[in-house]
Amino acid sequence: MTKAELAEPFVAFLRTEGYVPTTDEDGDIRFKCEGWLYLVVFDEDDPQYFRLILPNFYSAEDDTSRREAIEAANKATAATKVAKLFLLDDGSASATVELFATPLEAVLPVFVRSLGAIKAAVRSFIETIEA
């Protein structure tokens, strides 16, 4: 299946949930929720793989803030079901939920819960950073 074919049921679902999804040049979905830009990423080589991402929600500017962010990401990941937070080499933090499902549309009943897991993990991260 192509990314466009994989994305179709997710685009339809997001529209019924009141979001305004768009598909980028790579065939991945973009949508905003509470001011944040989320991505739904598909893999043509692994049509059972689903990834929901909140990219670049935080940026560590120096070594001290990077260490604090890594600790906050580890704490949030450990405390939150399914969600993972991580820092990239440039210091930006992202959050993700990754699942396998057959068929891929089986993710739809837990999509909103997956979005909630990312929000909970990010809240935990921010509370730790601000403490």
Image (cartoon, rainbow, N blue to C red):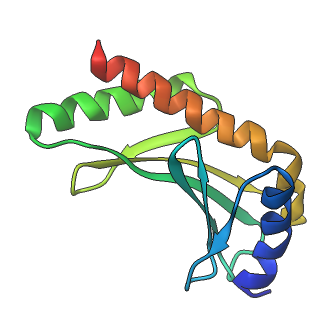
Taking the spot 78% from the left edge, 67% from the top edge, the residue there is 11
Is residue 106 at least partly visible in the picture?
yes
Residue 33, image x and y in percent? 61, 46
Is residue 101 at least partly visible in the picture?
no
Q: Is residue 41 above or below residue 82?
A: below
Q: Quadrant of the C terminus?
A: top left
Q: Quadrant of the N terminus?
A: bottom right
Task: Write down the quadrant of residue 120 in the picture.
Answer: top right
Residue 122, image x and y in percent? 48, 32
Left or right: 43, with 92 as reference point: right
Residue furthest top in the image: 131
Taking the spot 82% from the left edge, 50% from the top edge, the residue there is 17
Left or right: 2, with 73 as reference point: right
Q: Is residue 131 above or below residue 19?
A: above
Which sits in the foreground, 30 or 107? Answer: 30
Residue 91, image x and y in percent? 23, 49
Residue 48, image x and y in percent? 78, 67
Taking the spot 78% from the left edge, 57% from the top edge, the residue there is 14
Q: Is residue 15 above or below residue 121?
A: below
Left or right: 82, with 11 as reference point: left
Taking the spot 30% from the left edge, 54% from the top edge, the residue there is 88
